[in-house]
Image: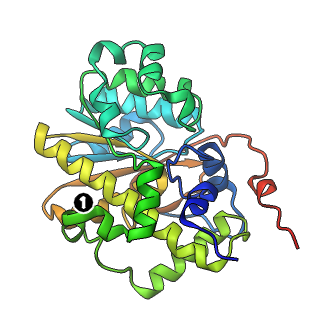
């Protein structure tokens, strides 16, 4: 049975598609998916926020990763925003239109921020997790990088490069991944989704993940050009990793830009390459595979 583009977006748990569906489960799947081995490649394993800030300071673009439903990760992001004092903040979780509706006064009020962003209907984890980060970012210019579900569906139908338009070449989105990397990513998507997806869905999930990386890179580029930086990006660890995430696309567009990234671990486990990593206790989650029970 073939699965449609709309269905792919509906079942896209582990990729963090920001379609408003299953994002809390996405964090759970990313942290606990069977068949994936955690791998950390980092210059620094930090113990404190001050150590992290020392590594990240001086970059043009600073990427602060997270597991979406881990409260401690967001507390660390809030403290780092306060320490680094960025001129702009890019959010994976909101659109550019939503970002432009945020004022410093609104950002000082968590309830009003959540209302303006229509957070309760967004599918992201509870706003109380993100509220400290938004509040600490109140003095910065706000940018959104969310690819709405309708646009993601269109991208799958047209092809992500065609959907991204004239900037696709600038960010390298017009080039296919190397065969080995494509195969690795598809295998990871299968494991992230509990080995419950048909094979033909996997390339689509990889494509949308790349689209989201490029969207984050484009937003970071706009933010840097408009403010001069530094720019902080708030996003999941999968997009924050230097070997595969938004940094790859941003570096393609701005070869001289200085990018540094934090990966936030749970119990010392994470995938990907970062400049610095910081560990926190794991969140207790139900088995994400319970929602993927296969019918024979």
Q: Position of residue 289 (x, y in %)?
A: 77, 58
Say whether residue 230 is visible.
yes
- Determine which residue is flagged by label 1: 250
SS type, badge 1: helix
Residue shown at 44% from the left, 68% from the top: 157
Q: Residue furthest right?
A: 296
Depth check, front residue: 18 or 261: 18
204 vs 216, left or right, is right
Say whether residue 267 is visible.
no
Q: From the image, which quarter does the N terminus lie in? A: bottom right
Depth check, front residue: 162 or 254: 162
Residue shown at 42% from the left, 34% from the top: 77
Picture quadrant of residue 258: bottom left
Q: From the image, which quarter does the C terminus lie in? A: bottom right
Task: Say above or below: 62 vs 104.
Answer: below
Q: Position of residue 236 (x, y in %)?
A: 47, 49
Task: Say above or below: 284 vs 10.
Answer: above
Q: Position of residue 201 (x, y in %)?
A: 59, 73
Task: Say above or below: 73 vs 16.
Answer: above
């Amino acid at each position: 049975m073939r699965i449609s583009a709309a269905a792919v977006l509906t079942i896209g748990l582990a990729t963090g598609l920001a379609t408003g569906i299953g994002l809390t489960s996405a964090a759970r799947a990313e942290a606990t998916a069977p068949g994936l081995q955690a791998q950390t490649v980092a210059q620094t394993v930090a113990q404190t926020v001050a150590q992290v800030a020392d590594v990240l300071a001086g970059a043009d673009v600073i990427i602060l990763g997270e597991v979406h439903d881990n409260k401690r990760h967001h507390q660390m992001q809030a403290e780092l925003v306060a320490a680094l004092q960025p001129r702009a903040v890019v959010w994976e979780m909101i659109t550019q239109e939503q970002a432009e509706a945020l004022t410093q006064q609104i950002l000082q009020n968590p309830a009003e921020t959540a209302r303006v962003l229509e957070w309760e209907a967004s599918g992201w984890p509870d706003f109380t997790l993100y509220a400290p980060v938004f509040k600490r970012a109140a003095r910065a210019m706000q940018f959104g990088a969310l690819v709405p579900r309708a646009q993601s569906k269109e991208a799958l139908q047209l092809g992500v490069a065609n959907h991204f338009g004239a900037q696709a070449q600038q960010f390298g989105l017009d080039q296919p991944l190397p065969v080995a990397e494509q195969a690795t990513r598809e295998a990871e998507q299968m494991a992230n989704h509990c080995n419950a997806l048909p094979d033909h869905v996997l390339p689509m999930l990889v494509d949308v993940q790349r689209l989201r990386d490029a969207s984050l890179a484009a937003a970071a580029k706009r933010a840097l050009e408009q403010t001069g930086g530094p720019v902080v990006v708030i996003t999941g660890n999968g997009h924050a990793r230097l070997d595969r995430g938004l940094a790859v696309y941003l570096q393609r567009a701005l070869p001289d830009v200085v990018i540094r990234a934090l990966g936030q671990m749970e119990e010392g486990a994470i995938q990907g390459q970062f400049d610095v990593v910081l560990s926190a206790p794991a969140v207790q989650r139900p088995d994400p595979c319970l929602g993927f029970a296969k019918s024979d």
